[in-house]
Image (cartoon, rainbow, N blue to C red):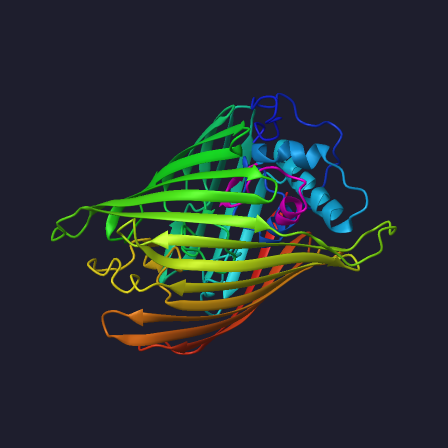
């Protein structure tokens, strides 16, 4: 927000004036969205942020989206790295996106999507969850508030309707930020998997509050809480609170506590469900592939991460996620590889089984996490080209047990996405194949075409 890029080492007060020396542009990339946060809608921008985290440029955690600009704004503005192309390019991209937010570039936008089938949920930053649709939005940031109004008509889960997804109103009070809206959230370290809170389903309306702090013991930290009212769910309300901290340059973690309450099923003796989760990332030493004297060094920046989520008994471990992610610049193209594995525990099978819908984190009948998987593996590749074209490739194999039919289900998803500037906007192409081994679904090929224009 215009609160966004304050110096957290001095104070966390709002910025009173925007930068006056940034160039203007008619074409604004999708990552250059004017909002108080780096949102959960662009895997390539997240990849650039992770480069800066693993290289030690930024001192804040990167395991919660939307991620407030004020957590890391000073770091990407003031830290300059002259002999590393990966870091230099990542800083330029994040600076441009941040300055676009501060200068209200790309306030108005139009978006279109058409596909033969709804694309399967493949992880962080999916372009659209609709089968087809069109939307328009207007956004504005001021020193103490920001808002975005988005309206559209689309087909989602077999229902055609007018929707207000991605709308919000926020109030900035320095270290505090309050908001109301329907924004996608992604809490945790995973890319294809998420045990805590993901953006596989459409966001539910919620009210939230967050606070940023810093001290010697915790480093840069942030706490956020929200209460949401999901539609077509077993519970009427969902409350989640998350604390994230980066006490060391090589280590960050997150603690999450969630409660679902006010059940729609009157037969429940207990009207609420609770769950706890922990996630952490450990940055590994970088690997240099070039001589020390090279002007543009080539380094592999990489890290390992984990997530642990409880059953409804918060003292029992229900599922765990392990992953590795690394990024390297090859001839001006930034390439990121992500490897993940999710496993269940012996307590997982009976967790949440007393409830009709199983795991309660659903919205419009779509799960917000991958907690229900017994076993799942994935590999993903993200390529950011020097000509602003972006490619993502992913493969995921998942198994889970249907408690109602005692049938072992399996799903293999192969997905390719291509993003390129064209026709004064950004074109999104998607092609995927889903191989199913379930009692209710057949194999599926999905192809999609999307277009986004900002002016």
- Camera-nearest residue between 225 and 129: 225
Image position, residue 420 (x, y; %):
67, 58
- Camera-nearest residue between 318 and 414: 318
Q: Is residue 251 above or below residue 8?
A: below
- Camera-nearest residue between 321 and 123: 321
Q: Is residue 220 above or below residue 307?
A: above
Is residue 57 rendered magenta in the image? yes
Image position, residue 245 (x, y; %):
50, 38
In terms of image quadrants, where is residue 68? top right
Q: Can residue 26 be seen from the camera position used here?
A: no
Q: Can residue 5 be seen from the camera position used here?
A: yes
Q: Which residues are magenta?
A: 50-68
Q: Residue at x 48, y 54 (%)?
A: 306
Q: Is residue 287 above or below residue 443?
A: above
Is residue 40 rendered magenta in the image? no
Q: The N terminus appears in which quarter of the rendering?
A: top right
Image position, residue 51 (x, y; %):
66, 49
Q: The C terminus appears in which quarter of the rendering?
A: top right
In terms of image quadrants, where is residue 96? top right
Q: Say left or right for 112 vs 243.
A: right
């Amino acid at each position: 927000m215009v609160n966004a890029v304050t110096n957290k080492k001095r104070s966390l007060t709002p910025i009173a004036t925007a930068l006056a020396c940034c160039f203007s542009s008619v074409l604004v990339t999708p990552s250059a969205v004017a909002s108080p946060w780096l949102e959960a809608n662009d895997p390539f921008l997240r990849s650039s942020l992770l480069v800066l985290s693993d290289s030690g440029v930024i001192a804040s955690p990167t395991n919660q989206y939307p991620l407030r600009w004020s957590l890391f704004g000073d770091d990407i503005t003031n830290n300059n790295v002259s002999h590393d192309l990966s870091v230099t390019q990542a800083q330029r991209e994040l600076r441009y996106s941040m300055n676009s937010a501060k200068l209200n570039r790309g306030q108005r936008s139009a978006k279109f999507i058409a596909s033969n089938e709804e694309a399967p949920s493949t992880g962080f930053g999916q372009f659209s969850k609709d089968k087809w649709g069109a939307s328009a939005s207007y956004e504005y940031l001021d020193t103490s508030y920001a808002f975005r109004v988005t309206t559209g008509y689309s087909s989602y889960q077999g229902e055609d309707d007018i929707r207000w997804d991605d709308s919000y109103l926020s109030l900035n009070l320095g270290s505090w930020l309050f908001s109301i809206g329907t924004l996608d959230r992604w809490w945790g370290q995973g890319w294809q998997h998420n045990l805590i809170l993901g953006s596989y389903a459409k966001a539910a309306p919620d009210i939230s509050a967050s606070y940023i702090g810093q001290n010697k013991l915790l480093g840069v930290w942030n706490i956020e809480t929200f209460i949401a009212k999901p539609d077509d769910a077993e519970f009427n309300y969902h409350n989640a609170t998350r604390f994230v901290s980066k006490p060391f340059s090589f280590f960050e973690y997150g603690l999450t506590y969630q409660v679902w309450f006010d059940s729609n099923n009157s037969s429940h003796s207990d009207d609420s469900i609770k769950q706890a989760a922990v996630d952490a990332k450990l940055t590994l030493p970088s690997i240099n592939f070039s001589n020390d004297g090279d002007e543009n060094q080539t380094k592999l920046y990489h890290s390992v991460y984990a997530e642990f989520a409880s059953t409804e008994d918060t003292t029992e471990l229900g599922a765990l996620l392990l992953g590795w992610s690394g990024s390297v610049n090859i001839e001006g193209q930034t390439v990121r590889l992500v490897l993940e594995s999710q496993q269940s525990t012996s307590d997982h099978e009976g967790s949440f089984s007393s409830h009709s819908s199983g795991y309660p984190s659903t919205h419009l009948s779509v799960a917000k996490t991958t907690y229900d998987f017994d076993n799942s593996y994935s590999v993903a590749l993200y390529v950011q080209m020097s000509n602003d074209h972006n490619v993502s490739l992913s493969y995921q194999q998942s198994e889970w047990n249907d408690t109602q039919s005692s049938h072992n289900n399996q799903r293999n998803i192969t997905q390719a996405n291509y993003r390129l500037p064209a026709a004064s906007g950004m074109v999104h192409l998607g092609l995927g194949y889903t191989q199913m081994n379930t009692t209710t679904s057949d194999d599926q090929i999905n192809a999609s075409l999307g277009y986004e224009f900002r002016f």
